[in-house]
Image (spheres, rainbow, N blue to C red):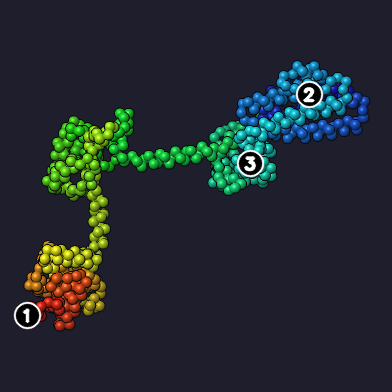
Amino acid sequence: MSGSNGGSNGEAVRIAGLPIRILIAASSCAVLLTSALTSTALHALGEQTWSDSGVWGLVAGGITGLAFPATFWMLGGRSLRTVRRIEQFIVDANALLAAPTVEAVRTAPGELPTHSLPTQGEPALVALEKRMLLLQRIAARFHAIADYTYGVEAWFNPEGRLIWINSAIERVSGYTPMECLLAPDLVTLLVYEKDRSHLLSVVQEISNQPQGEHLELRLRTKAGSLTWVALSWRVLPGPGTEALGVRVSADDIQHRKEIELRLLETVAALRREQGMSEYYLTLSKEERSRLLALLDRIRLGVLFVDRDHRVIFLNRAFHRIWNIPEGEDFVGARVQVLLERGARLRVDEQAFNHHVAEMMKLPESNAPYQFDLRDGRVLTLLSALVQGTEPVTYVGRVWIFEDVTERVRTAERLQQIADRDPLTNLYNRRRFHEELERLIADATRRGGELGLLMMDLDGFKPINDRYGHPAGDAVLVEFSHAVASIIRRNEMFFRLGGDEFAVLVPDTDLTQTENLARRIVQRVSDLRFTFGDQSVGISVSLGIGLSPVHAIDQANLVDVTDQALYRAKAGGKNGWRFAEACPPTGAASSNSD
């Protein structure tokens, strides 16, 4: 029996002398406590039978069952202070188990309750009880360390199965440690579906990378929300060549991610404000270099002049807009000298100079002034005084030139689509009503007369029906060209739809309007069209109305003129009629035929 006791004590000393590794210390402590307590119990029993010794083996097994939960909880600490405390606890436990007497235990390092240690001559059961109480106290310390660790700590066995996780997981994810341990697939339970593939690819590389840090991914909490965590891991080496498993640490970085998102939004907002050139003028000399780099890369031509109207800066876009080589330096020159370099490009130099003179009198920004260049480009000019750091002081003026050629062309195309008939390129019905209302108001204000000719083609429908729509379109286009060649520049020609057309004649009278109708009838009668081997002609009927002779408003003038057109077609076509309200004259009932 004494040999058995010595073997037990020697085994305890040998284990106590091993290098302590915090991630495997719990397992060593559990095995050590079991072996030592069993050996001590057998030594105290002396000559008891083997069956009695078996009872003590069961007691030792129960102690082992208490020791292993302490092992799992002990892995929760991550900080250096936690690691050192765990190491000290294990050293204390080894010293306790190796000490045969209370004096030897008192010489062991650490704070141990010496009053509860076994002494020589004590019954074995009392000694065992004291040792169990001490072990429970040590286990309670391990539990406290693991439970109060802020980050999530977990232990996975070599097969990748979760065997322990601390209570911090409930704070982060809402799942209790037991729910995690019982989950058939922890990755599916916790990890956001879009991050799982990346996590699994990293897991496959753990065998080649014993430790790693800063793997960021999102967890799906029990409430359904997402939270960001940063993972780090370390392979736990065993006593031999095999690993005990992998320790995984997770830190909640949701707050940091929210801060990063707000920073990104702030950066985006600042970039949208980079076009405010006036803001950059208030910066110090240290900001000047960044401002100049920005101005050299924008498409606006920017020119700064000081209070004496001398150039202090012009960017590359300014050189490009005015066809000035970049090598030419105008800094220090008067702004008028620089503007004169572009005089040969401007279509209306007098109007431009007048605008510049008026603009120089204004302290605030002027409305964009648009002007044309001889090469077809269209520019706008915007200028304003640059305020200094002191109130009511100005350090100079900024000129901004922009090439808006494409914008103007696009607007013109859109306006043409809105105002023009796509087949004949004449003004359409919408534009007709706009211009009729405007010209009636103008004629009323000046005391003049406005003539309206409404016309309809004779014989157009048979051509369209017999030869098809392409033939009808050709007739409409040729008719439009013929009439357009007759009317004057101040007269406006419209296609109202189908084969209906109209002409507005400002500043006219009955005689002039009738002469125009006669020329139109004659010109259209001369038109000939060939479709296949057939030669076809057309004619036109017109109704003539004048404001305010026949009507003083738009709707009535259109109505009486349309009735005159109907009478012209009913009276034999190829002619014209005046509106009913016209005073009866010979000219009012005449016909070109």
Residue 207 seen in the current view: no
Q: Specify which label sits upstream in the sequence, 3 or 1.
A: 3
Q: Which of label 2 and label 3 is nearer to you? A: 3
User: Splitting the image into 4 quarters, where does residue 12 fall?
Assistant: top right
> Residue 37's x, y, as percent?
81, 27
Secondary structure, mark 1, is loop
**Can you identify the residue that label 2 sits on?**
97
**Can you identify the residue that label 1 sits on?**
586
> Residue 414's x, y, as percent?
26, 58
**In this rendering, would 221 be left or right of 264?**
right
At horizontal 67% and vertical 44% (from top left) the residue drawn is 179
Q: Residues within 10 Å of mark 3 (few under 14, many from 20)?
A: some
> Residue 431's x, y, as percent?
22, 64
Q: Quadrant of the N terminus?
A: top right
Closest to the observer, 481 or 40: 40
Residue 177 seen in the current view: yes
The circle drawn on residue 170 is 3
| Residue type at numbered disc 1 | Gly
Closest to the observer, 284 or 153: 284
| Residue type at numbered disc 2 | Leu
| Residue type at numbered disc 3 | Glu
Q: Which of label 2 and label 1 is nearer to you? A: 1
